Image (cartoon, grey):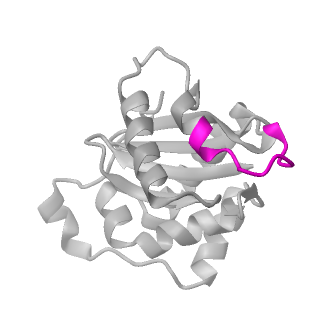
Amino acid sequence: MINAVLVFNNAGQPRLTKFYTQLETSVQQRLISEIFTLVANRPNSACNFLPLPPLLQQSSKSSTPSTPHNDTPSLVTYRHYATLYFIVISTSTESPLALLDLIQVFVQALDGLFENVCELDLIFNFETLHAALGEMIVGGVVVETQLDRVVEGVKSQGRVAKRPVNEGKFGGGGGMGMGRGGGLWAGR
């Protein structure tokens, strides 16, 4: 099960925080700051999987003894694209490689929806960001990973905002280098 999906910029500012398990706000804030610190300080040569910090594992466990151990968050999977970190916190039952693929499809869907997505698209069009995530994950369970279906599902909701034509004059290109055209995927 997926417990949370987080997106941060390089400065540690959250651009998306979606929790699929109930946590107190103080625990969520601590989780956000500690996860970003862990992920941002890892070298480029390190793998994209790491265990959830023990402090956070203890606070996220359920107080009921009937809850199975494999249902507690235990794995952090992330990808770094240009100026954004895409992070998934999950249980040990999820495949880390499948989660990397999920992140890749999510980023490609955003790129298809925004036509060369940049960080400002995520800030000003958060409804589209949440709609794309909602097409892929429902209640912590992955329901769709086919790129075309995700993009069409969001477009059919009418949640895609178009950028003004003259925006390129102000942003110096504005793109994160995550899509078609000028740049390649700069992920780890």
Vertical side of 186 occupied by 22: above or below: below
Name the dominant secondary structure of the magenta segment: loop
Does the magenta segment cover residue 38? no
Is 38 or 165 nearer to us in this picture?
A: 38
Q: Is residue 108 left or right of residue 81?
A: right
Is 52 or 180 nearer to us in this picture?
A: 52
Does the magenta segment cover residue 61? yes
How many numbered marks does the figure carry? 0
Vertical side of 85 occupied by 166: above or below: below
Is 74 or 80 nearer to us in this picture?
A: 74
Residue 180 pos. (x, y %): 45, 49
Work out which residue is located at the far top of the displayed protein and give it. 45
Q: Is residue 70 visible?
A: yes
Residue 29 pos. (x, y %): 40, 51
Residue 13 pos. (x, y %): 30, 50
Vertical side of 114 occupied by 34: above or below: above
Tell me the residue at 48%/44% (across/down).
86
Tell me the residue at 48%/50% (across/down).
27
Tell me the residue at 63%/82% (across/down).
156
| Span colored in magenta | 58-69
Quadrant location of residue 56? top right
Q: Is residue 181 visible?
A: no
Tell me the residue at 57%/25% (across/down).
50
